[in-house]
Amino acid sequence: MRDAVSDLLLGSACVGCARPGRLLCASCDAALPGTAHPAWPSPVPAGLVTPWATGAYDDLLRALVVGHKERRMLALGRPLARLLATAVAAAAGLPGDPARAGTLVLVPVPSRPASVRSRGHDPTYAMTAGAAARLRREGYAVRAVRLLVSRPGVVDQSGLGAGERAANLAGSMACPSARLRRLALRTPCARVVVCDDVLTTGSSAREAQRALESVGLAVAGVGVVAATRRRFPGSALTNR
C-alpha cells in the first residue's frame, strides 16, 4: 500500500501500459513470463554453458530492464528478481524438493565501476541478490556472491558486434583469490550459475564462465531475464 500511495503522489505510471499508479500494474505483472527457455545466441561462443532466459528482450521485459538499470526505478527490481529466479532455477535444474537441491551460488556478471558510479547503483547485483532471496524463501540454499571483478580497459559494449564484444571482453574478468577463499570457507561444495539481465552475443556470460572455471569453479548454467530476439532466428522464445 505504501508503494502504491508513493507512486501515485509522485506521478508514476506503469512501464508496460502507461497506466497511472505503480511502475508495474497488476495486469502487466500477471503477463510476465512464468517459465524459462534455452536462449542460445548465434553464433554461440565456443564452450558456453546453456543460457536460460524468460523471454525476448523487447516490449515489457525491455521496459523493465531499462527502467531499472538506466532510469533507477528501483521498485522494478522485485519483478526482475522473480524473473531471474525462474531462469536460475532452470539453469541449475533445481528439483521440486529443496532438500535434494544442494547449495547454489549465483554470480552476477560484474558491471564496470564507471557504470555503477554513473547509475548510482549496481542493477545486476541487485537483481541477483533478489533472485537468491526469492529462492531461499522457497526453501533452497542459495547465495548471491560478487566473485568477479572487471579489469580496466573494457569499453561500453553498446553498438559492438559479436566479434567486437568478444575481443573487448577477452580476459576482462577475474576472480580475486581473497573472494575465492571466503567462498570456500562459507560454501565449500556449491554449484554456480552466472547471472545477468540481458544476453546479447553471449560474450559477457562466456567471459564470466571462463574466469570462474580458471579458478576451479564449475558453472552449471547461465540465467538471464531476457535475450535479444535478433539473436534467435526462428526461435520460439517470446514474451507472453
Image: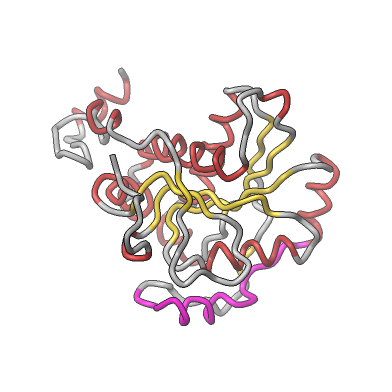
Q: Is residue 193 left or right of residue 119?
A: right
Residue drawn at x 49%, y 43% is 127
The answer to whether residue 134 is above or below residue 81 is above
Q: Is residue 191 left or right of residue 11?
A: right
Q: Position of residue 84 (x, y in %)?
A: 48, 42
Where residue 65 sits: x, y (%)? 35, 50
Q: Position of residue 234 (x, y in %)?
A: 32, 60
11 or 153, which is in the foreground? 153
Q: Residue at x 40, y 51 (%)?
A: 226
State the residue in front, 3 or 206.
206
Which residue lies at the image location 30% right of the left edge and 17% below the top edge?
Answer: 1
Q: Which residue extends farthest front?
A: 234
The answer to if 174 sits in the magenta stretch is: yes
| Picture quarter with the C terminus | top left
Left or right of residue 73: residue 81: right
Instruction: Please state the horizontal and vertical placement of residue 38, each as a whole percent of the image.
Output: 48, 51
Residue 147 occupies quadrant: bottom right
Q: Residue at x 46, y 82 (%)?
A: 164
Residue span colored magenta: 159-176
Q: Is residue 141 above or below residue 16?
A: above
Q: Quadrant of residue 212?
A: bottom right
Q: Nearer the viewer, residue 206 or 187?
A: 206
Front in this rendered view, residue 17 or 55: 55
Confirm whether the magenta stretch covers residue 145.
no
Compared with 77, 235 (above or below) is below
Give the total number of marks visible in the rendering.
0
**What colour scheme does the image use?**
secondary structure
Which residue of the protein is positioned furthest toward the top in this rendering?
Answer: 1
